[in-house]
Image: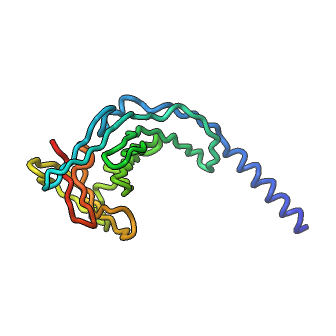
């Protein structure tokens, strides 16, 4: 009798799990959303330090997600489509192309992550959802406005790199409108400010 109960439960589980399976078709990145993306193809982003040193990031292309289909297995039939735009770059010190910024968004929520890579220091931030509760996030600090160089920027966020053994970046200053505004090297305490 016990074996029959186990078989019945197993069969019911398979039926329920199979019923939750759904093929989901996801569209390509919507070009109307490009207004949310900070950088453009062939942008050169220049940073300078107090010694008139120059560090540049060269955006070589912007890639977009293509349409795709996947098999979703969710009990509640919540099958998100994630699309993205990403800026592929090289820089003064790195000739191998890498993703400098990737914006990911979902069609089942208002999630919109901006994923940055500043000289090997990778971090992400969702301006829509995380900015209202940034005071509860230990790695981040928010300023309603801040002067960097001779320019005043609104809604500046600072992320602190707490990984001592990681990339030689101690802090990155950024906002949604302008992207990376400044970064500071850990070993030399050199500040590299966005050159406007």
Q: Residue furthest right?
A: 1
Relative to 68, is 56 above or below? below
Relative to 121, is 3 above or below? below
For residue 3, what is the image quadrant? bottom right
For residue 49, what is the image quadrant? bottom left
Relative to 165, is 12 above or below? above
Residue at image point 26% right, 49% down: 180
Q: From the viewer's side, name the closer residue of 173 and 91.
A: 91
Residue at image point 31% right, 38% down: 36
Q: Residue furthest bottom?
A: 164
Q: Residue furthest top?
A: 31
- Decide if residue 18 is on the left or right side of residue 115: right
For residue 38, what is the image quadrant? top left
Picture colour scheme: rainbow
In the rendering, at what x and y percent does residue 30 appear?
42, 30
The quarter of the rendered structure image containing the N terminus is bottom right
In the rendering, at what x and y percent does residue 152 appear?
11, 49
In the rendering, at what x and y percent does residue 45 appear?
25, 41
Residue at image point 15% right, 41% down: 196
Q: From the viewer's side, name the closer residue of 52 and 180.
A: 52
- Decide if residue 138 is on the left or right side of residue 7: left
Q: From the viewer's side, name the closer residue of 76 and 160.
A: 160
């Amino acid at each position: 009798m016990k074996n029959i109960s186990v078989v019945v439960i197993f069969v019911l589980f398979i039926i329920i799990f199979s019923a939750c399976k759904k093929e989901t078709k996801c569209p390509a990145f919507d070009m109307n959303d490009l207004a949310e993306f900070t950088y453009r193809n062939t942008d050169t982003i220049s940073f300078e330090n107090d010694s008139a040193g120059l560090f540049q990031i060269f955006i070589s292309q912007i890639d977009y997600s293509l349409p795709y289909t996947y098999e979703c297995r969710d009990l509640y039939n919540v099958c998100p489509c994630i699309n993205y735009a990403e800026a592929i770059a090289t820089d003064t010190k790195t000739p191998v192309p890498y993703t400098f910024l990737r914006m990911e968004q979902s069609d089942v929520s208002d999630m919109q992550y901006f994923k940055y890579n500043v000289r090997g220091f990778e971090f992400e931030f969702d301006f829509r959802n995380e900015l209202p509760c940034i005071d509860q996030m230990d790695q981040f600090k928010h300023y309603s406005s801040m002067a960097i160089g001779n320019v005043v920027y609104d809604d500046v966020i600072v992320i602190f790199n707490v990984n001592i053994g990681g990339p030689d970046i101690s802090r990155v200053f950024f906002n949604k409108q302008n992207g990376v505004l400044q970064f500071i090297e850990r070993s030399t305490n050199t500040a590299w400010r966005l050159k406007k």
